[in-house]
Image: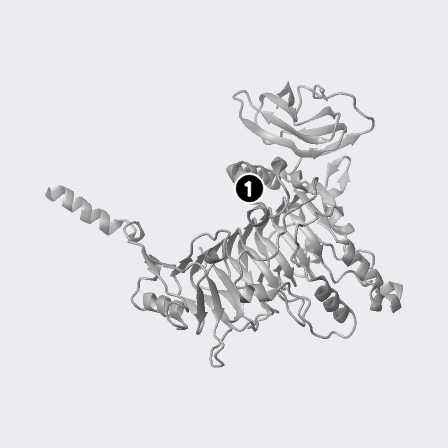
Amino acid sequence: MKYFIGVALFMAFVLPRSLYAVVDTVNVPDYFETGGTEGTLNNAVTAAINDGTLNNKVFKLKAYGLYVLTGEITVPVGKKLTIVANEPGSDQNSAPPQIAWSTSGTVTTTYNFNCFGDISLKNIWLFYATTSGNQTGTSLRIQDSPDTINGQRATFEGCLFDYSQIGADASGAISVTARHFRGTFTNCYFRNCSDRHFRYYGRAVSFPYQSTGWHTDSLKFVNCTFANMGYVIMQEGSEYTDFLSFNHCTFINTMMYVLESPWWYWLSVTNSMFVNTFMFGDIGENNGNPEPGMFRIDSVSNFGFSPPFTDAQRHILLSHSAYVCEPWLVDWMAHNPYSDTASTLMDPKPAPMLNQRTKMFFDTTVSGQKVWPFMNRQNLYDGVNPNLLLAPSDIPAIKRFLYFKWTNNADTNWAFDPGASLAQSWPLPENAKIGNATLRTAAMGGYPVGDLFHWDKTRYNSWKAQEATEKTQILYWLTNGITGVVERPGIPTEFALSQNYPNPFNPTTKIDYSIPQAGHASMKIYNLLGQEVATLFDGEQKAGNYTVTFDAAKIATGIYFYKLQYGENSITKKLVLMK
């Protein structure tokens, strides 16, 4: 008995305290159930900080509750703040709890959360305004910390970031002033992050204006929507993000850049929908290389600083995504009162999906080989209107704002139904579900492009079951590059797969195949155990004859099989790699 007691005491001493820590759930009362008391969340968090239990507390907020801040909530160095609520349903009483600001003139509204440590929010509605609906210029700030190895971590799931204008430090809804920030956003909605004056403020994540020395290690967005924004991501000066990814995201009505600055290191944009991005348009100053509607790439030599990587070491993937500038916006650019009288050089023009310089990085080859093999684009749909069911677009307000920015720079609010946020209406009035039949199967696996969680919940539930497989494929493409698929002349009459040539081969071989009708096709490589080792193509293809190149430089000598799948039909053949 003494032996077991001794072992237990020893283990309690040497093992991390977190393994034994008891996590307490604190049910925080809201404004209404306390008879109009403000600061209940402030008080609950402060009490946990003061008694040293913050890391072991989960603060649970009430569905459809209102939590009125009376000051910023600070997360101390080495601590973690966790705030959660139940996942909202489809009725008003299940609405996410909303955190808003007091109307008191004595409250400083610079930061709603000032994080020197970690923060995790789940199913929370952050309203960047007072309870009377006035925008406050607030940011959720990620501060620097002595922990320069692990950095600050922020995790957001099912959160709304609503009605954020220019921040006090000229950043965004999330302000990054840390050397090693790591952020994850899952099923989040950035709604009406718009500014009445600045076309380039109202951002999701941003370094502050003219800041230096800050850095983001990783930033990931999955099933997120960004509607009515100035920018989405802002990189300032020599500050940048090592790894940035968007999967199944929807971007609607971005006044300027979706992704500002061209100095991407590892960037992945997949299965996403871009609608009316860079609405300000090209106004003639870009010498035939206009700002694009999705993102841009430039050479390391043009960065203006020296990053720890070369162009050859950059990994950029743009796959299974769509872009459109809607007809009403194209028409307004051409026929508003300003454009009707302006010189042709100053007319605003719709932004292209990608500009020529960006395409050059994706497409340049020498002797048939890609110059930048780890920068790739595939399965893109340019100019295809998604026919959103009910877009979050106040078209007259957007037209008015654009006209003012093109002419006299006057201020006006162009947000979509901010009153719904003030009233905490649930569900929100918009519905960005895609109606276009092509785009409803354009993502990997035949899913719709864009955010499935918010706008296509039935398809989301199915997609979730294969998320891990999809993630693995995206990472493979991003890391290893995409083997090129080239269309050959002619109209096929049958489904066919040819023997690879040469065979045996080292390290590349070509495979010809034919698709008689448009549909979903895939070409995959398997080892003798039936394990998938490479995907050469997986997506929608029109009827045609194709040649795909398989580069086996990174796999071992041996016998492999390649399989062409088209609908319910498949053909498998053997190939031999000899090194």
Image point 74% across, 54% down: which residue? 292
| Mark 1 secondary-structure assignment | helix
Position of the N terminus by quadrant: top left
Position of the C terminus by quadrant: top right
Q: Which residue is mark 1?
A: 458
Does residue 488 appear to the left or right of 90 in the view shown?
Answer: right
**x then y, percent, for residue 403:** 77, 68
Relative to 14, say whether 207 is above or below: below
**x then y, percent, for residue 201:** 64, 67
Which residue in the rendered view is the most extreme toward the left? 1
Q: Toward the viewer: 110 or 236?
A: 110
Residue 131 visible here: yes
Residue 261 visible here: no
Q: Quadrant of residue 350?
A: bottom right
Image point 57% across, 70% down: which residue? 167
Q: Amino acid at mark 1?
A: Thr
Question: What number of labels is visible?
Answer: 1
Q: Toward the viewer: 224 or 430?
A: 430
Does residue 462 appear to the left or right of 536 in the view shown?
Answer: left
Relative to 37, say whether 269 is above or below: above
Q: Toward the viewer: 43 or 74?
A: 43
**x then y, percent, for residue 122:** 45, 55
Does residue 364 appear to the left or right of 230 in the view shown?
Answer: right
**x then y, percent, for residue 21:** 29, 53
